[in-house]
Amino acid sequence: MIGGPTIRIWPLAHQMYGWDMMASVLVHEFGHLKLYHAEHIYKGLEAEDKANRYGSCHMRNDLIPRNCWLYREFFLPSHIFPGGWDEAKCRAEYEKWITWLKDAPMVRALAVPANGMPAAGT
């Protein structure tokens, strides 16, 4: 769609988040495409939530990262925060999230190593 909604991903985001987390972003963005074609919506919190579901429902299961929903929950506040998250805010929130993840008993299965990055394949 020329002149319509676009997808922007930081070129080096994979270095901070890892490939699985970035794959969850692509699943989400694919969901936006499916959502737009089905319901013609692409803005607002409802669209962000639905894009997660549309992406997961229309993607092959073996292409969806195991912790896709956990990653999507991390990014959801970026759509609520006034003006969105810039790179500095994103980095700060990620550091807080990684600290929480290390201490959260319900998600210890992620086996977050000392460097703060989720293990490969998570």
Image: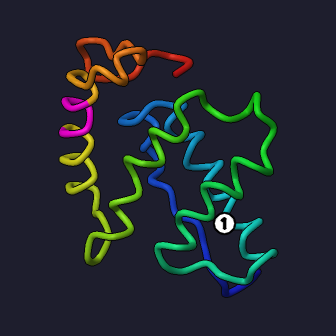
The picture quadrant where one finds residue 81 is bottom left
What residue did someone put label 1 on? Answer: 32
Q: Is 51 left, or right, of 11 in this rendering? A: right
**Residue at 48 percent of width and 48 percent of height:** 72
Residue 108 at x, y = what percent? 34, 17
Q: What residue type is labelled 1?
A: His
**Does residue 56 sit above or below 49 in this rendering?**
above
Residue 61 at x, y = what percent? 76, 33
**Residue at 28 percent of width and 63 percent of height:** 86
The picture quadrant where one finds residue 17 is top left
Q: Is 95 left, or right, of 107 in this rendering? A: left
**Residue at 80 percent of width and 75 percent of height:** 37
**Does residue 8 sit above or below 10 in this rendering?**
below
State the scheme by which the image is colored.
rainbow
Residue 14 at x, y = what percent? 46, 37
**Residue at 57 percent of width and 43 percent of height:** 24
Q: Say few, some or many: other residues with alpha carbon within 10 Å of mark 1 (under 14 / 14 to 19 / 20 or more).
A: many
Instruction: Point out the stretch of residues depicted in magenta.
Output: 96-100
Q: In which quarter of the image is the N terminus?
A: bottom right
Q: Is 22 left, or right, of 75 in this rendering? A: right
**Does residue 3 sit above or below 32 in this rendering?**
below
- Queried whether the magenta region covers residue 47, the answer comes back as no
**Does residue 11 sit above or below 76 in this rendering?**
above
User: How many numbered marks, from 0 up?
Assistant: 1
Residue 87 at x, y = what percent? 28, 56
**Tag 1 secondary structure:** helix
**Which residue occupies the foreground of this view, 52 or 106?**
106
The prevailing secondary structure element of the residues shown in magenta is helix
**Which residue occupies the foreground of this view, 60 or 107?**
107
